[in-house]
Amino acid sequence: MNLTKKHRTAFDVTVRVLLALIGGYFVSMYSAILIGNHLLSDKTNSIITGLMLSFIFYLVTVLFVFATKTTLRAFLVVFGFCLVLNTFNYYLQGPQ
């Protein structure tokens, strides 16, 4: 199968859109959980703060995905950031 430049560009844009949607969701979800659970405030205010800041994390993730030069780099950075947020949340929770 011979892919032309037009097909590669369309595939690249499709992958970036999916990465922005799914990766942005996971980044915002993990950031909301991390901020909501570990902010030193009362529980209600920390949850609201985490949810409000998750919109900013989502926006920054979408902008980053479309601003990077390669799709692979965008994927690796978004995946790494999700992994870091999840790891911080796991270790800050302590033993259960």
Image: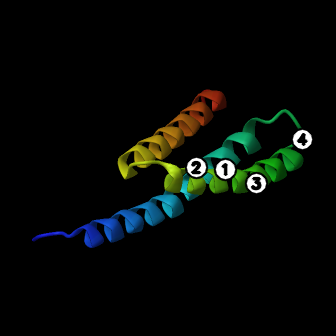
Residue shown at 10% from the left, 71% from the top: 1
Disc number at residue 57?
1
Residue 47: percent from the left, percent from the top? 80, 49
| First in residue order: circle 2 vs circle 3 | 2
Give the residue number, with chain letter if any, for mark 2. Answer: 27
Residue 4 is drawn in which quadrant?
bottom left
Give the residue number, with chain letter if any, for mark 3. Answer: 51
In front here: 21 or 72? 72
| First in residue order: circle 2 vs circle 1 | 2
Give the residue number, with chain letter if any, for mark 4. Answer: 42
Looking at the rendered structure, the kind of residue marked 1 is Phe
Look at the picture and state if 76 lies above or below 92: below
Q: Could you give the CA–CA distance between mark 4 and mark 1, rounded to whole angstroms?
A: 22 Å
| First in residue order: circle 4 vs circle 2 | 2
**Cβ atoms under marks 2 and 1 closer than 8 Å:** yes
Q: Could you give the CA–CA distance between mark 4 and mark 2, rounded to whole angstroms?
A: 23 Å
Q: Could you give the CA–CA distance between mark 3 and mark 4, rounded to whole angstroms?
A: 14 Å
Residue shown at 58% from the left, 49% from the top: 27
Q: Could you give the CA–CA distance between mark 2 and mark 1, rounded to whole angstroms?
A: 7 Å
